[in-house]
Amino acid sequence: MPFGVIAPAYAPPPLLTPAEQAAIPQRLDLTVGDQMELLGYRLDQAAIAPGKDLAVTLYWRAAAPMDLNYSVYIHLLDENGIKIAQRDIYPGRGLFPTTLWRPGDAIADTYVIRVPENTFRPNRLQVQAGLYALDSGGPLPVRDGAGRDLGSAVRLGEVLVLATPDGGIANRVAFNLEGRATLAGYDLDRTAVRAGETLHLTLSCRAGRPLADDTIVFAQILGPDGAAWAGKTGRLAGGWPQGQATPLALDLTLRPDTPPGEYYLDAGLYQAPTGRRLNVLDRWGHVQGDRAVLTRIVVLPAEPAPEAAQFTPPEVPHPLEAAFGDVALLKGYRLDQGALNPYEPLRLTLYWQAAATPSTAYTVFVHLLDDTGQVVAQHDGPPAYGRWPTTSWAPGQVVIDEHCLSLKDTTFSSQVLVEIGLYDPATLQRLPVAGGDDKVILPVRIDVHP
């Protein structure tokens, strides 16, 4: 047992040969901090179902000796940029701490992360990775081969969460309400909505035993602090047929003053005479609360996004002309704030005009840079929060693209510049800008003061 089972199980990962390093499938060649290199990555599948495990392989190489044991993090972000899962672990499952690495040591390190069972489908999950020091919690900066700062996280490829194949319940769940009823599934018309707009929810409810006709279904949209910003109740038409999943449509209209951000969508049952909610029980019968968390949604900024293709450029507050390859022309921008409190998000609107219909779904990056050129805040995402991916653009179409950026350091006080660009999320290759650069610095400085 010690030599045949235990020792092999606790052996450090084998070092990669030069031939194996040359055969890495998705090449990146990024520098993380000053001592590590992320050579590339591999995703074991392009599509996955909720509740399944995704294997992510990262190819690391030591560039210099390290006196700290750095930890790897893997995040899964949904199509709205919400973090739905994460995995934090030392390299080599903890068996090869970075203080033992010698310059030139390279390994293929595989991390398994589970896609949560309540992940909304269909969806596009972005895999994000990086390194940080566990003691200080600070992530290491990432730079490309030209020394450009890419922030503190590496955006890897996408994984699709496909729609339900059998045409049945779109998003199956199994919330047990005191053994009397089950919330069996739900569907939404969208997962990103604006203040004042209506979200269309369909719940699938099943009675476990006969329920009174005065049993009411409720749904609500809650902020992180538990405050309700939308709510709706309803009754099943024809009562509660035992054992049968019955759909119920509920329309939730957000308050006009709902601030942008991440929100929870909850549902449950209560008895009309008393108002008592039925408790949600886990598989062992333990009470988990009196409401079921279905999923999370994003409330977008109040400025309406284009609902149809626009071919007449709108009035742009700050016009400019910057061509990104043969894909798009940045016509200008709008900033909602001339000065910024670091506790508040910066809201930036970009105006793109399509030059072609590319075959690549490019990602927009927006960076705030301090006086040294370091990234102090960033937002990456498809144009218009995914409503207008570049693969859907028609030549001449104008796309209004919004971004919200939050500074992690709330004590930050300085002027910042705004950096804009487009890149291929599969290769991280940026689109060139006319003039030879691969980014645009907006002609504005923003004062940041706590």
Image (tube, rainbow, N blue to C red):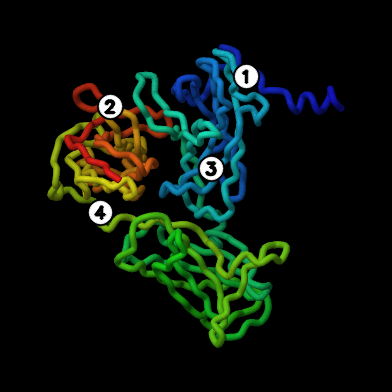
Instruction: For label 2, count other residues whose C-alpha is less than 10 Å away and answer few (under 14), some (14-19) or many (20+).
Output: some
298 up-or-down from 13: above or below: below
Instruction: Tell me which numbered mark, 2 or 1, is placed earlier along the sequence.
Output: 1
Closer to the chain start, of discs 2 and 4, is: 4
Eye-nearest disc, 2 or 1: 1
Please tell me whether mark 2 sits on a helix, a strand or a loop: loop
User: For the residue labelled by badge 1, is the local secondary structure a helix, a strand or a loop?
Assistant: helix
Determine which residue is flagged by label 1: 100
Eye-nearest disc, 1 or 3: 1
Quadrant of residue 224 within the rendered picture:
bottom left
One can see residue 23 in this view: no
Q: As drawn, is 394 to the left or to the right of 79?
A: left
**What separation in Å lies between label 2 and label 4 (alpha carbons)?**
27 Å
Mark 2 lies on residue? 438
Q: Are marks 2 and 1 in contact (CB under 8 Å)?
A: no
Q: Position of residue 392 (x, y in %)?
A: 31, 44
Labelled disc at residue 47:
3
Q: Nearer the viewer, residue 376 or 388?
A: 376
Q: Are marks 1 and 3 in contact (CB under 8 Å)?
A: no
Disc 4 residue type (three-letter): Pro
